[in-house]
Image: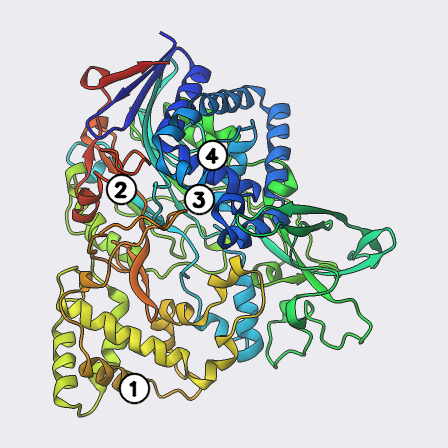
Amino acid sequence: MTGEIFRDAWGIPHLRADGASELARVQGRVTALDRAWQLEVERHRARGTSASFLGAEALPWDRFVRRARLDDTARRCFAELERRDPETAGWVRAYVDGVNEGLDEGARRTPEFAKTGLAPGRWEPWTPLGVWLGIHILFAGFPAKLWREQVARHLGADAVGLFAADGPGTSGSNGWLVSGERTVTGHAIIAGDPHRFIEDPGVYQQIHLSCPEFDVIGLAVPGIPGIAHFGHTGTVAWAITNAMADYQDLYRERLRRTGAGIEALDPDGVWRRAVRHTEVVEVAGEDPVEIEVIETARGPVVIGGPEGLPDGHLEEGLPEGFPEGLQEGFPNGVSDDAPPLAMALRYPPRVTGDLGFGALLPLLRARRVADVDRAVDLWAEPVNVVQAADTEGGLLHRVAGKVPVRSAANGIGPVPAWEPGHDWDGWHETPRGGLTDGVAAMANQRGLAAPLGVEFAAPHRADRITALLGEKERWSAADMPAIHMDTRLASAEPLLDLLRALGTLGPDAERIRRTLLDWDRRMDADSEGAALYAAVRSAVVRRLAAHPAFAALAVPPAYPEVLLPWLALLPRVGFALEHLLRAEELYGIDRAGTVREAVEEVAAEPPSGGWGDTHRLAPWRALTDTAYDEPRLSGDHDCVLCTSAVPGLTDLAARGPAARYVWDLADREAGSWLVPLGAWGIPGSPHHRDQLPLWVRGDLVPVVTDFTEFEKESDV
């Protein structure tokens, strides 16, 4: 045997090989067969070349990627991996070899290549690292620092907390660990669901990897060897949630052009040469675009340049009460001849040359919790909360990843590169935690990772999971999908409290009020109460966002387009509505009057039917010319079933559970898993969307690991 590809009833690949490197080659090959279009889109996005076949719509991303130097960072990290860990580097090369073997055949199966005229390219050894960077470069949400800066400038420092909520551009997860003392088998269960933008094909790939060294099932990231985030080896299982840590910084730079190039002002007062070159981005159907790439000692310049930030942004003074740590970052009192500003991004792999790939092989080889613990010590980014359990009763609940030690101001907003005190000084020790009453629930809330972050998700999902797990003394793996699908919306209470306190309403508005006050707070697809609540909520959000008090935030600054989702006022109001309605005072806004107007508006034109009539799946696709009748959904952004719309803007859900899993340490095959669409990324194929009905209902696919149960597809 060299390598074998098997398939189960859902088209999920189950792979066997003689050794780890040969298995990596087979994994790369089968991924290219099933996900060729996805792989090539991600390769081009990581290199900043996607506009060459997707057109001008992809140009903002390509521009950002070029300026952030993702491809160069991937090359550096792979070179460092070869130096530090040649075994893992060779394993990654084997995966890439497999991708290159399978791409042509995969492309022939996939219609998008013919539609765009794209021919598969060649993967390089560092391409998986570039794909990883491209997927996660915005994961820590550094653009939120630009938003906090805007809010503080226009409304004052106290307003920053009002808008501190899980925003539309972030990604999160639910995850819970139930120890053996709380299960029917006496062995632990790990379950959860990562929340990301729902993509077609999906961002996670169900896979089974088996060789003499290990036998692992889990959710792989297409383009990346191994199983990084969610896996079960039979004797140990692990899963992650986003720790919401802050590990990327923005530095305000003073740059100037000289006859020899570009210089940046360093903290010691000396102007030093910055790295500078130009790159050309090809754009399908349009002229090529030239991009200037600049890197200072802090990092690549991603906003502005020697001529300054767009439209002279931030050249005016600051309001009273602005956070002390940020005041020094602004050109308050700077003389007229001071150089204009730009912003550089500092992110750990660019600094260290380490992307954490050294953890991937040890995870596959893990047998006990201690092995997982040692493996994730090597993790870099994204920074995650890791939960693990083994068959001997071992448990793990910790943060993993690199978070730099630096001043508190770095975490709040952009800081001045020319002032001392903003350097990175080593790495934080990652926190560890335990279980309470045999349970640990993480849902991106302020908790275990609190010392490492600035903003976290609201506690509602974590609190609800903990409450549900407290309802029974003993749990089984079969019980877990019901928790995945819980739709209670605790964050509805502030709006309902205001509605309850209103005086006399018109007859139609009064009927809406009675319906909402009797509503069970569940965002179920068939619920008319949920539909009414969502309609009133959206009307309130639109009115608040249009209020003159927030007018200065209504038009985002002229930053690069890829960063604008973090700077849009309407989503910010929508996701922070709970805080805005409960604040002691809100800039003179009559919130009760706003709710009254919103209810009267909805009463004049009420929604017909249930929440799911407008709350439907809206997955991201690189090509948008294929229409599907997407399903009605239950859930909302603060429900455990986190199908996230943008209140006030759209009820469509582009973000939600990108996978679901239940890992049972008593019996691996008692577990289950699911992805939103299917195992294959080939439109029209039998396994492109066959898991979607299960995903909508909350059913899962059983985990099967016995190769005698599978159909053999090929030897490779």
Mark 1 or mark 4, which is nearer the start of the sequence?
4
Q: Which of marks 2 and 1 is in front?
A: 2
Q: Is residue 223 left or right of residue 597?
A: right
Q: Could you say where residue 169 lies in the image, as x and y percent from the top left?
A: 43, 57
Mark 2, residue position: 677
Question: Residue 610 has which mark?
Answer: none
Q: Which amino acid does label 3 sit on?
A: Asn
Q: In this view, does 21 lie above or below 279?
A: above
Mark 1 touching mark 3, by CB under 8 A? no
Q: Is residue 455 left or right of residue 513?
A: right
Label 4 to label 2: alpha-carbon separation: 29 Å
**Residue at image location 60% in from the left, 30% down from the top:** 78
Mark 2 or mark 4, which is nearer the start of the sequence?
4
Mark 3 or mark 2, which is nearer the start of the sequence?
3
Residue 121 shows in the view: yes
Mark 1, residue position: 592
Q: Which amino acid does label 4 sit on?
A: Val
Which quadrant of the figure has residue 328? bottom right
Label 3 to label 4: alpha-carbon separation: 10 Å
The residue positioned farthest toward the bottom in the image shown: 504
Rendered-image quadrant of the N terminus: top left
Mark 4, residue position: 376
Q: Nearer the viewer, residue 699 or 113?
A: 113
Helix, strand or loop at label 3? It is strand
Label 4 to label 1: alpha-carbon separation: 50 Å
Question: Residue 384 has which mark?
Answer: 3
Mark 4 touching mark 2, by CB under 8 A? no
Label 1 to label 3: alpha-carbon separation: 40 Å
